[in-house]
Image: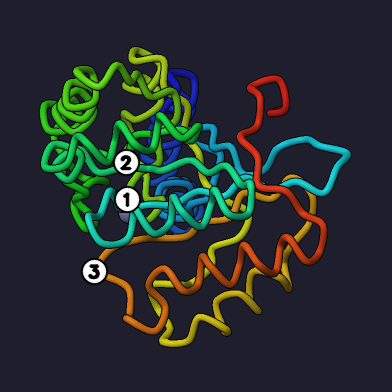
Amino acid sequence: MARSTLIVLLALKAIALTLAVFGQWWAAAIVYFVPDLWVLYHLFVPSGQGLCPVVTRFNTPRAEVWLTIDDGPDETDTPQILDLLDRFGAKATFFVIGERAKRCPKLIADIARRGHEIAHHTQTHPVGTFWCASPARLSRELDDAIDTLRPSGIRPRWFRPPVGIKHLLLPAALAARQLRCVGWSIRSGDVLVRSHERVVAHVLRKLRPGAIILMHEGPSLHPAVRVRAIALLLEALSGLGYRCVLPDPSQFR
Ligand SMILES: [Zn+2]
């Protein structure tokens, strides 16, 4: 959270307490609690920009999208996905979990060697507890994954929090490590359904140039969706004349 935002929030608390002292209970309650709702919204809604700037699309005049694949690397899925990307001439960014990257450095090397990008998705992927992690834990989640990738010669520049839920101290923590927070334009829903056709149909409904597409790999996906959704999506995008590219930093607002 920016210091100016914190000062405004604390000032509103002080005003609310002053109103309460003068017996203005309803006004005091509104001034006290409404800012908390604002904080909760921007903390838990992945596209919320109030607490931490999040990239949710890129600028392009062409039929291009940014394909992002979370939660790998995975010994079963990643090699198949890399072959699919090659077949369709597509590039992707893999938001990897540090613990998994540590177990399979060869996959990390393969991803980079084949022209894709590796990005930061925390060290342990603490889905339910990232937002309330202690400052020390937040630092460990960020630094341990950076340390894990360093021997492969990779220094990630993008970060995505687990399920897009942020942390109050995230903006400063990312800035100190030259990381930028990336969300998405299209959440494919691939971890929620059991049909790869449904996943792709959902993505295509929201498709537009400059979209960031969120996909996943690994055992959290249903077997009917795992790898197959990415295969069908690449085929569909190719048929529509869309290219999967790695955007240049100048293409972000
Ligand atoms: Zn994830």
Between tags 1 and 3, which lies in front? 3
Residue at (63, 22) in percent of width and height? 249
Q: Identify the disc placed on residue 85.
A: none
Residue at (70, 37) in percent of width and height? 58
Q: Earlier in the sequence, mark 2 or mark 1?
A: 2
Mark 3–mark 2 Cα distance, whole angstroms, equals 17 Å
Q: Which residue is mark 2?
A: 121
Disc 2, disc 1: CB below 8 Å?
yes
Q: Which residue is mark 1?
A: 162
User: Which of 116 and 68 lies nearest the eye of the viewer?
Assistant: 116
Image quarter where the C terminus lies is top right
Disc 3, disc 2: CB below 8 Å?
no
Q: Is residue 76 above or below residue 173?
A: below
Quadrant holding ligand 1?
Answer: bottom left
Mark 2–mark 1 Cα distance, whole angstroms, equals 7 Å
What element does badge 3 sit on? loop
Q: Earlier in the sequence, mark 1 or mark 3?
A: 1
**Label 2, residues with CA under 10 Å away: few <14, some 14-19, many ≥20:** many
**Label 1, residues with CA under 10 Å away: few <14, some 14-19, many ≥20:** many
**Label 3, residues with CA under 10 Å away: few <14, some 14-19, many ≥20:** some
Mark 1 CB within 8 Å of ligand 1: yes
The colour scheme of the drawn protein is rainbow
Kindly tell me whether residue 8 is visible in this rendering: yes
Mark 2 residue type = His
Q: Which residue is mark 3?
A: 219
Q: Position of residue 60 (x, y in %)?
A: 81, 37
Mark 2 CB within 8 Å of ligand 1: yes
Residue at (39, 29) in percent of width and height? 10
Q: Earlier in the sequence, mark 3 or mark 2?
A: 2
Mark 3 CB within 8 Å of ligand 1: no
